[in-house]
Amino acid sequence: MRPTHHGRQEAGRGDRPEPRPARESLTASAARAAAAGGAARLDPGAAAALQRAMGNAAFAATVQRSADCDGHAHGTAPAHGTAPAPVQRAQDPAGAVPVIQRKWTDGTMSGDDPVFTSDNGRAGSVEVHNLKGTPLGPAANSPSVEPVGWGALRSQGFTKMAPGGEKPDGAPYRAVRMHLFNGRLGGPGNNTDNLAPGPGKLNSQMSAQAEDPAKHLVELGNAVWLKTTVSYQTSAVNAQDLTSVVPNHINMQWGVEGDAASARSWSSAITLPVDPLTPQQAADLRSWSQGPDALLNALQGQSRQVIGQALGLVPGHDLKMALMRTYPDLYRDLNATDQAAFLTVLPSTAERVNFLGVINLGVDEIFPQVLHPLFQAGHQAMAEEIFRDCNIADDVQRKMVFQYGPALLETIGNAGYELVMRDRAGYTLLKHFPESSVAALLDVLDQNGSLNPLLAQASALDRNKTLDSWATARAGNDSEQCKAFINGTSMAQDYKNQYSLWKKSKDDAAAYREGRPKRGAAARASNSDG
């Protein structure tokens, strides 16, 4: 594998700017080094002088040409986002060479340039730091190029959009081009080093279990890092050998810059393409009547994908449960609709929770693999019951809220309210609730007299903003009505007084701005008076 630093392509990159006139004299040796493309070998003082003389863009181009000649960099970035910000300078650990650190911007996202590592022409890994902003829309940076082997996957009918149209959910293999660096976070869709073929189901799991939590950290205003790596069954690459172009494993790590405790990791095996069952094999499974033991014997030695197809075909709860118990990962490979359908077949919450233990489902998998599929299928109450019966410790519940945010809180309903009420840091959870849910939660706390302990955890400014949102939701936009609403609650009088003063200062500031004459209008009035 060879690392390549893929920055964003600059507009007009081919027309390199001419060096600007020097603002200070350079030594003859520095000038000769620059002319020879050897800026990377300058000592730090000479390099700084050279950069001041040439300008950022020309200096960066000179260093890049030198690095390319020395074999320290490879390739150029695909066109992506806007032109990078001016080059930032930092000393490397040895103190001898100024390291060029580029930034990129793509709509509402920005970050340091990602570092891609290819694996014999296939996607290998990507690492990116300082992701900031607001995640882009759902279709941002959709794949527009084909990674090695994609044509063979498509021609053999293994892609989601195969010849003849989109394949149904139950098809044996629905390959998509998976982003290693998520497109909504700024990951390019026109760079084959960022795209690896894989099952659509796995891509959805990665989105729910890894990419969405990373996006949530960005939405909360953090600077986020991530690293994704894929590995293959074989090192040799043959575009027609699908087992050599589809990875067999993927791992993603992410967290907040400078906060080791926030680091998270997700990984999964990747099912490789196999031929679908014949019509006769499928028919035999649909009408299977020989019992669970015979079924397991018949499937012994078959690939996991064939066994997964059998799970969707065999009739009856007993046969499906026998397969699940023997091959626990089968449940994880189901799409969300089938996961919800299977769980609802189980007769009680206790049996559902017991089943999760049978398949060794970890706490970090409960939301994406159990709760969210049930919620999407319209079984919110069932999801809440499972969440309660799993007896998850409060500190782990809190981490789940931080990771999955409003999606989790909407799914677990009142269990989320109860966590806020009993958690020693309950106020920090409020920002993860939708605004309407915060108002409903404060209503409950007000009714049972528990407002003060929660409000005591907040700063005065945050507390007043929270109370104002609550008052506006319940009393409308009129300031006097908002203050009257707050005064009628069970909270401490001191909090009521602070809110009233804060609200008055906001109203006074708004009135001043409204009454202040506009500059243009004031000037015209002055001229007319003269």
Image (cartoon, grey):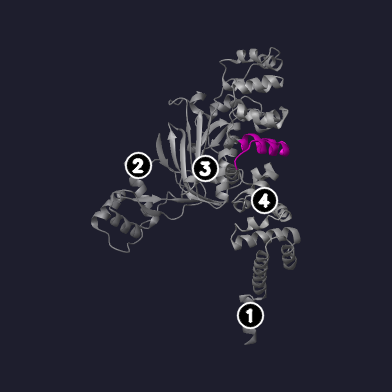
Q: Residue furthest left?
A: 28
- State the CA–CA distance, disc 1 to disc 2: 63 Å
* Extreme residue toward the bottom, this view: 530
Q: CA distance from mark 2 to mark 4?
A: 48 Å
Magenta-colored stretch includes residue 391: yes
Label 2 to label 3, Cα distance in Å?
Answer: 23 Å
Q: Residues within 10 Å of mark 4 (few under 14, many from 20)?
A: some
Identify residue for label 4. Answer: 434
Sort mark 2 into few (<14), some (14-19) or many (20+) by Cα contacts within 10 Å.
Answer: few
2 or 4: tag closer to the N-terminus: 2
Disc 2, disc 3: CB below 8 Å?
no
Mark 2 or mark 3: whose residue is earlier in sequence: 2
Question: Residue 92 in the image: x percent, y percent?
Answer: 34, 49
In space, the residues marked 1 and 3 are separated at their CA atoms by 52 Å
Say what amino acid the circle numbered 2 marks.
His
* Residue 526 picture location, percent across and down: 62, 83
Helix, strand or loop status at disc 3: loop
Please provide the residue range marked out in magenta.
366-393
Discs 1, 2 touching: Cβ within 8 Å: no
Q: Which residue is mark 2?
A: 72
Circle 1 SS class:
helix
In the displayed structure image, the side of residue 288 where residue 240 appears, left or right: left
Q: Relative to 145, does residue 101 appear above or below in the rendering? A: below
> Which residue does the image show at 57% across and 51% down from the upper left?
220
Say which mark, if any, is on residue 188. Answer: 3
Three-letter amino acid code of the residue under disc 4: Pro
The vertical placement of 476 against 321, above or below, is below
